[in-house]
Image (spheres, rainbow, N blue to C red):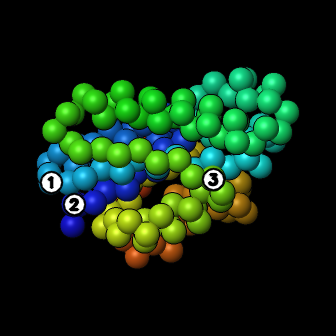
């Protein structure tokens, strides 16, 4: 266990905390780290992105899906590469996919035979979470792999 770790990131504060935890987990277990960003065009173009990455550049693309995916995913993965580079002993790879985040995380984890999935918990709020669920809830409930959900600061205070 903890030899092939998939960490999902959207560039948010919670995802960054999860990435840091996954890097430490990989270092402690001499595991491989696979960093995954899933681009969800519906949420992005509707203005419902969950990351803190600057999305203004995508607005001028007016539906140029491939270019928008490239710009946004590159921003998220570049930030992840910077963090991972601080632990050069950790073998890290970086992947960008598009589609429904929960579905793609689960599909890709199975495809690469990950033994662990690490992700942040997004604070949707009690009612939104009850109605919509969150990506981390969906993944944790459906994954065959060990799933580590890293709470954000607000979760710890509650």
Circle 1 packing at 10 Å, graded few (<14), some (14-19), many (20+), is: few
Q: What numbered label is drawn on residue 29?
A: 1
Q: Earlier in the sequence, mark 3 or mark 1?
A: 1
Q: Label 2: which residue?
A: 3
In the image, 37: left or right of 5? Answer: right
Label 3 – label 2 distance at C-alpha: 25 Å
Q: Where is residue 142 in the image (x, y as percent from the top left)?
A: 50, 74
Label 1 – label 2 distance at C-alpha: 7 Å
Q: What numbered label is drawn on residue 98?
A: 3
- Image vertical order of residue 119 relative to residue 108, above or below: above
Q: Residue at x 57, y 38 (%)?
A: 73
Q: Which residue is drawn at 35% across and 69% down?
A: 113
> Which quarter of the figure has residue 118?
bottom left
In the image, 127: left or right of 8? Answer: right
- Image vertical order of residue 153 relative to residue 136, above or below: above
Q: From this viewpoint, is residue 151 visible?
A: no
In the image, 86: left or right of 157? Answer: left
Query: Tags 3 and 2 in contact by the CB under 8 Å rule?
Result: no
In the image, 154: left or right of 35? Answer: right
Query: Tags 1 and 2 in contact by the CB under 8 Å rule?
Result: yes
Tell me the mark number nearer the camera, choosing from 3 and 1: 3
Q: Which residue is drawn at 72% across and 23% down?
A: 56
User: Please, what secondary structure does the residue beneath circle 3 have?
Assistant: strand
User: Please, what secondary structure does the residue beneath circle 2 have?
Assistant: loop
Circle 3 packing at 10 Å, graded few (<14), some (14-19), many (20+), is: some
Q: Position of residue 5 (x, y in %)?
A: 31, 56
Q: Earlier in the sequence, mark 3 or mark 2?
A: 2
Give the quarter of the figure containing the N terminus.
bottom left
């Amino acid at each position: 266990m903890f030899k092939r770790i998939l960490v999902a990131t959207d560039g948010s504060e919670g995802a960054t905390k999860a990435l840091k935890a996954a890097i430490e987990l990989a270092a402690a277990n001499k595991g491989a780290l696979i960093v995954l960003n899933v681009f969800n065009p519906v949420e992005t173009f509707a203005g419902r992105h969950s990351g803190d990455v600057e999305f203004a550049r995508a607005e001028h693309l007016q539906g140029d899906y491939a270019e928008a995916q490239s710009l946004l995913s590159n921003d998220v993965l570049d930030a992840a590469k910077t963090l991972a580079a601080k632990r050069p002993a950790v073998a890290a790879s970086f992947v960008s996919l598009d589609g429904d985040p929960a579905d793609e995380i689960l599909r890709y984890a199975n495809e690469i035979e990950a033994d662990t999935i690490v992700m942040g918990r997004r604070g949707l709020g009690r009612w939104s979470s009850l109605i919509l669920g969150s990506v981390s809830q969906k993944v944790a409930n459906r994954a065959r792999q060990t799933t580590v959900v890293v709470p954000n600061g607000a979760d710890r205070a509650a």
